[in-house]
Image (cartoon, rainbow, N blue to C red):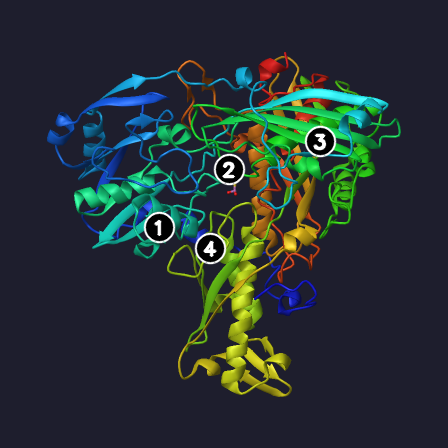
Amino acid sequence: MKFDTAAGTNPIDAERVVGQPLDRIDGRFKVTGTAPYAYEHHEVAPDTAYGYVVGASIAKGRIARIDDGAVRRAPGVLALVTHQNAGELGQGKRNYAKLLGGPEIQHYHQAVALVVARTFEEARAAANLLRIDYEKAEGKFDLEALAASAPPVEGSSGEGSQAPPVGEYGDFEAGYAASEVRLDQRYATPDESHSMMEPHASIARWDGDELTLWTSNQMIDWGVTDLAETLKIPKEKVRLVSPYIGGGFGGKLFLRADALLAALGAREAGRPVKVALQRPLIPNNTVHRPATIQRIRIGANKDGRIQAIAHDSASGNLPGGKPETAVAQTKALYAGANRMTAMRLAELDLPEGNAMRAPGEAPGLMALEIAMDEMAETLGLDPVEFRILNDTQEDPEKPGRRFSQRQLVQCLRQGAERFGWADRNKAPGAMSDGRWLVGHGMSVGYRDSPVMTSGARVRLGTDGVVTVETDMTDIGTGSFTIIAQTAAEMMGVPIDRVAVSLGDSAYPVSSGSGGQWGANSSTAGVYAACVKLREAVATKLGLNASDIRFEDGQVVSGDRRVPLADAAREGEIVAEDKIEFGDLDKQYAQSTFAGHFVELGVDRFTGEVRVRRMLAVCDAGRILNPKTARSQVIGAMVMGVGGALFEELAVDKRHGFFVNHDLATYEVAVHADIPHQEVVFLDDPDPLTSPMKAKGCGELGLCGVGAAIANAVYNATGVRVRSYPITPEKLI
Ligand code: MOS
């Protein structure tokens, strides 16, 4: 089905099931330990062996010699995989560094060997006996030293979602020079690690030349494609199964070493093999959010109207890698005739940088929204009013291209009202509560809401149960539940008459979970399949599909009511379809917006920051399930606290690795760091996004939070910190 923006109302608009705050279908399984994660499919085979991954102990260079004699003699060892016996491997499209290194080493902890043994303990003990001699080469690890001389990222005209978001519109330098009030500041964000609860893990089993992989992956079809290309086998020979996922945050968008090594290990050992990346390997072996050094210039007239805005950002990556697109949101967040965005990309020999929740926007807004706070102060304007004054309803770089829906002003007005913004501390350092300096800050959240082709199959069983099958994943977001709600709404049955099966490449290809496109796109795919099923049911019952309703388990046509299950009396009815959006993203900018408000205290003696309350008001289209959507946003706000105050991968610039590569030393926000959080959705269906009239909110919730905290810290203390995380030593 091609999405038609002029289609008007549809059965979802009834909102009998969609829009209800239902509990997550998978919630009980997850909290009772009965949802099988990738490493826990004990049914695969009783003799599943264990793999232990060995990571390179240099950042750049070559393996000179491998002495594996002791490993092969160690108790329980079944196989050893290195580049020497792995055969010729291809390269998937989506990882820059090889998932099995050697002889060349591209980054620290790049996988160089897998030891397979009967038990995990035997595999680990044997791995410690592996001797690898390296020839170490000089590497480049210091972004700060390389940023200024790094080559610029070439833009195109900015068309299409894949083009780097760089370019100039109007005349920035002239507009900036002519502005009455100017800001020119630098900001820095550190490397960050996804730190999801479930590590990357896979079990591989070969049946002849067919490979089945139970794994933890956000994008099933990408995983199948890249694994087939890496192993140089046909895609049809690979099946991925990933029904339950313990978090991803972008770290599981792409195939990682656990998956490839499990497949190679199982082939070598001649039996199924399971591999979980050991936690201390994850930050250096997998991917991270790259650090940025950003410069922002804003010029405005004294009335507060922005005349010129420029944002450039430097980041680094391995050869072939991409920049962190921290300037993306600056292209269309605020009005202003003269605009420039630019990026520089330094070649670094640190581990591969890649997508982490709201890639680009999250670190970009951490900088831009401090800059806006600084400008408001210089102009003597309320930071909320300054932003409202510079709102724009069309894309400022493509005049005439409108946002499908943009209610940022409403988010800010409602947020200010609910938060009590009028009663905030108005002068930096002027409000205290015992030893605590109290501050208030706000920021804007802005994140695109892309749409992706997404397919599904629905079955009406002889028992009247509706079953949905799609390779969509649920990374803890609520996909199971909103998909069930969609099918229930469309087929007019209660939610407990719907069964949802996800995360299996045997099912139709979906949008997958990434870029906050999953909720809107995957449910729209289920909608499309249900439209077909409704037609099939009508045909079976001899009714006209255009004037029947599906409600209360009945098919209703005029005075006639037929139980839905009757349609399947002679056998199950199956329908399959996908939703396609054509060039919708060219016609409209599809985006989500938020106003973030924060109150915090700063200990006047130690510099400790304690967040006291947080509010987000979100413009994210129709909210398919207020409970799961709120969970997404509060989770993202927690991540925002981490990003503002704690998270930083410390780079060892001599040896080229992230030093704090485990959960003991890489600090994330925990329960004790999080205060009362409030989330409000405008909940206004957007008919230009999909038949669901929904958008994403999982990444929106993170966008801007860090800056709201930074601005509140400034408001509390009068100390303006422009480099994250805002640790106590930066305040005292
Ligand atoms: Mo997201 S960083 O596309 O999982």
**Residue 435 in view, yes or no:** yes
Say whether disc 2 or disc 1 marks the residue closer to the N-terminus. Answer: 1
Q: Earlier in the sequence, mark 1 or mark 4?
A: 1
Circle 1 SS class:
loop
Q: Amino acid at mark 4?
A: Met
Mark 2 / mark 4, whichever is N-terminal: 2
Q: Measure the C-alpha gap from mark 2 to mark 3.
A: 24 Å
Q: Quadrant of the N terminus?
A: bottom right
Establish if 657 lies above or below 258: above
Q: Which residue is mark 4?
A: 472
Residue matched to label 2: 355
Closest to the camera, between mark 3 and mark 4, is: 3
Residue 485, located in which quarter of the rendered image?
bottom right
Which of discs 2 and 3 lies nearer the camera? The answer is: 3
Instruction: Bin the neighbour count of mark 2 within 10 Å (Cα to Cα): few under 14, some 14-19, many 20 and up.
Output: many
* Cα distance between the residues tagged 2 and 1: 26 Å
- Whichever of labels 2 and 3 marks the residue nearer the N terminus, that label is 3
- Which mark's residue is nearer the viewer, 2 or 4? 2
Badge 3 or badge 1: first in the primary sequence: 1
Q: Is residue 715 left or right of residue 73?
A: right
